[in-house]
């Protein structure tokens, strides 16, 4: 029988280095910052932002930023829509890290959700 895993949740500053991608320049962060969920298996950061810019513009920003960061890593785009909504995923198996950026159209602006996961070393 396994023991229950320990889970720690707290709010932390939205740090670009910890997230693994830049913050969108014209976005405002929702809430107090990023939520950090830490378990024995690793750490996940979750951040929500809103931007007055359309989803197409925000998606273009993240597409370009993640291409620059990709250098030898795995980059994928999932489910692009006509309104600019999309999900971008950057995986780095060697570093045991993955970053997902979801851009959604919201009125004339957009919503940005970043999920950054760092797996614990085996």
Image (cartoon, helix red, strand yellow):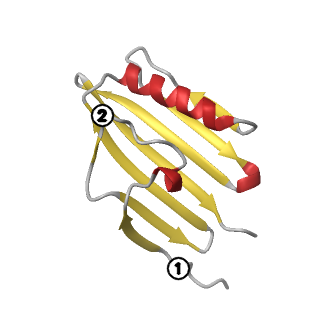
Q: Residue at x 45, y 19 (%)?
A: 81
Residue sitting farthest toward the top: 82
Relative depth, front residue between 40 and 93: 93
Q: Residue at x 47, y 22 (%)?
A: 60
- Viewer-side label of 2, 1: 2
Cα separation, mark 2 vs mark 1, equals 36 Å
Q: Is residue 49 left or right of residue 77?
A: left
Residue beneath disc 1: 6
Question: In this rendering, is residue 2 above or below 91?
Answer: below
Label 1 near label 2: C-beta < 8 Å? no
Quadrant of the drawing holding the C terminus: bottom right
Mark 2 Cα-neighbour bin, 10 Å: few <14, some 14–19, many ≥20 = few
Q: Is residue 55 left or right of residue 2?
A: left
Quadrant of the drawing holding the N terminus: bottom right
Q: Mark on residue 26?
A: 2
**In the structure shown, which secondary structural element does the residue marked by tag 2 occupy?**
loop
Q: Position of residue 83 (x, y in %)?
A: 37, 17
Q: Residue at x 40, y 19 (%)?
A: 56
């Amino acid at each position: 029988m396994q023991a229950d895993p320990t889970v720690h949740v707290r709010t932390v500053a939205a740090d670009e280095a910890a997230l693994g991608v830049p913050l969108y320049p014209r976005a405002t962060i929702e809430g107090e910052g990023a939520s950090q969920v830490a378990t024995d298996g690793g750490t996940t950061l979750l951040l929500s932002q809103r931007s007055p810019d359309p989803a197409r513009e925000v998606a273009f920003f993240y597409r370009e930023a993640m291409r620059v960061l990709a250098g030898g890593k795995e980059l994928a785009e999932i489910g692009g829509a006509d309104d600019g909504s999309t999900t971008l995923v950057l995986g780095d198996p060697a570093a045991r890290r993955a970053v997902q950026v979801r851009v959604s159209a919201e009125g004339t602006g957009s919503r940005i959700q970043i999920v950054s996961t760092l797996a614990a070393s085996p």
